[in-house]
Image: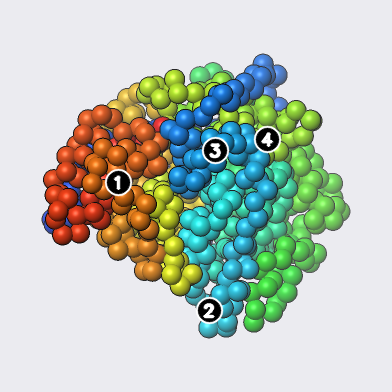
Amino acid sequence: MTDTVLSTTHETRLPDPDPHAQPTQSVPGGAMLIPTMASTLALAACSGGGGSGTSPPPIAIVTPTPSPTPASISAVQASRFLAQATFGATRADIALVQSMGFSGWITEQISRPRTAHWDWLVANGYSVTTNINNQNGFDNTVWRQIISEPGQLRQRVGMALAEILVVGIDGVNQQWRQFSVAAYLDVLLDNAFGNYRTLLERITTNAAMGAYLTFINNRRANTTTGAMPDENYARELMQLFTIGLNRLNMDGTVQMANGNPVDSYTQDDVTQLARVFTGLVLDSTDSTTPDRLRRPLVINTGLHETGASSFLGTTIPAGTEGMAAVRLALDAIFAHPNVPPFVSKQLIQRLVTSNPSPAYVGRVAQVFADNGSGMRGDLTAVIRAILLDTEARSDAVLTTASTGKLREPVIRFTNWARAFGATSTGGLWPIGDTSSSSTRLAQSFGRSQSVFNFFRPGYTPPNTAIATAGLLAPEFQITNELSVVAFINYMQPAIQNGVGDVRANYTEISAMANDSQALVDEVNLILAAGQLSAATVAAIRGAVDSIATTATNATLNRVYTAILLTLASPEYITQK
């Protein structure tokens, strides 16, 4: 995938000089060293895909073939499913999946309510005017939701969408930024099981997206000065949110012509589409409260382009009312044949595996194109197809080298927090910004510094066995020697003492502390879905048994050791 990067003004677009660039830094002396961790963190990810300016020739449709629900689901199978569908398994969740079945659990999750980010911020007093120019409360509400909300499938799908339809709080140049991005995340979560076309319209009229991709107050062309409409959103809507750079077959493979990928759109398509996204503004000038940031943008007719716009083979007639023009443009893009494979492939990457087979992508893309009832873009059907597919559920794929993905740092943290019942004593979840790659997680949800996310879907770490094998590994773009050691050094005190007032409860697992086999097996099940090798289990048991059961604080220290070494193991960090 050929990527571009935002300039500091979000206007000039330049090619990325090195899409595979990855900083390498030495491990500081005194850091806790986990042997071979940096060299054995594993797996792969998937290319972004593309789109077409004209419709590609018809292709064969692959009939979706979901994996049959087994007569009985083992605890290991349930835990593996939850690793894909939630921010972390718990013993209770495992039992629920076993009793309800995979499909039944999905159905039950879809109906679960949640507390909106916006409402939580208001209820906890963050709407006072002293917060007008800061981000107070943002990280709190993010961590609270992804760790403690019972509707975990919605939360996990919401994060997947947030890493495709990216808005990062530091790039939102508005007052009340915590409320602006909270409202954006609420849009993603509210529509996580809705229709992708509806979601596209909701993000297009969202204040945070408008600020992040600089199309709020976007003006029509000025023939006197030569000024042209901002093209930022028009470009990213096509490149990153819907059709991608190249024409795709239904199975996500790139269409070629004369040995080269076929472009999905042209610069003229971008320029013409940008005319549509002019005139979108906030519906009020009142900044004394954050309320206007929650309401949809409206059209200022004095700024909107009234002439015709032609792009991707579609023409919006001159004189079309502003919001009507926006909806016609979104309809045209949504109908593009690239949308099903482009979006489906990335959702598979975020939830299940970095390198889905073309057949897997094709099965899910067909469901995106038609949910079986003639509906296009039904995200409930798409998520169900992703999680129930043979490549997601079959135990046979566990031995395939291309199966799986690197667990994102945020998810590693929430795996621990959820597995061991972490709660916030004061209810404010003061974990904070975990973006630092030298002292924290190298990732913090909602804080991407680029519209290209923390990592790109087509990233492969250069000069590695992964690259040699022709595999992709997006999460490796934020993984290096420094971040690997920082993760362990951050988790060690977190496991023992919590973060702020967020602390785990080890009462239940402490009952197993004197039996290293039972202890390590339990941690292996809940955190790693039983995927630690016999050699790794033996090594962790040896470390646990090196702490005498009669030693001071032996019970908790044995528990801490089992958890930390599991989190540090390559077999855990690679989600299969």
Residue 534, position as x, y percentages in the image? 25, 29
Indicate which disc, 4 or 3, sits on the residue closer to the N terminus: 3
Residue wearing tag 1: 512
Say which element carries label 3.
helix
Please, what is the three-letter code of the amino acid marked with disc 4?
Ala
Contact, mark 4 vs mark 3 (Cβ under 8 Å): no
- Residue under the point 66% across and 40% down: 107
Mark 4–mark 2 distance (CA, rounded to whole Å): 40 Å
Q: Is residue 195 in sight in this rendering?
A: yes
The residue pinned by badge 2 equals 131
Q: Which mark is residue 97?
A: 3
Q: Earlier in the sequence, mark 4 or mark 2?
A: 2
Give the distance between the C-alpha atoms of the residues marked 3 and 1, in whole angstroms: 24 Å
Toward the viewer: 552 or 394? 552
Callout 1, which amino acid?
Answer: Met
**Front-most of residues 43 and 516:** 516
Q: Residue furthest top?
A: 60
Vertical relation: 345 (above or below) 8: above
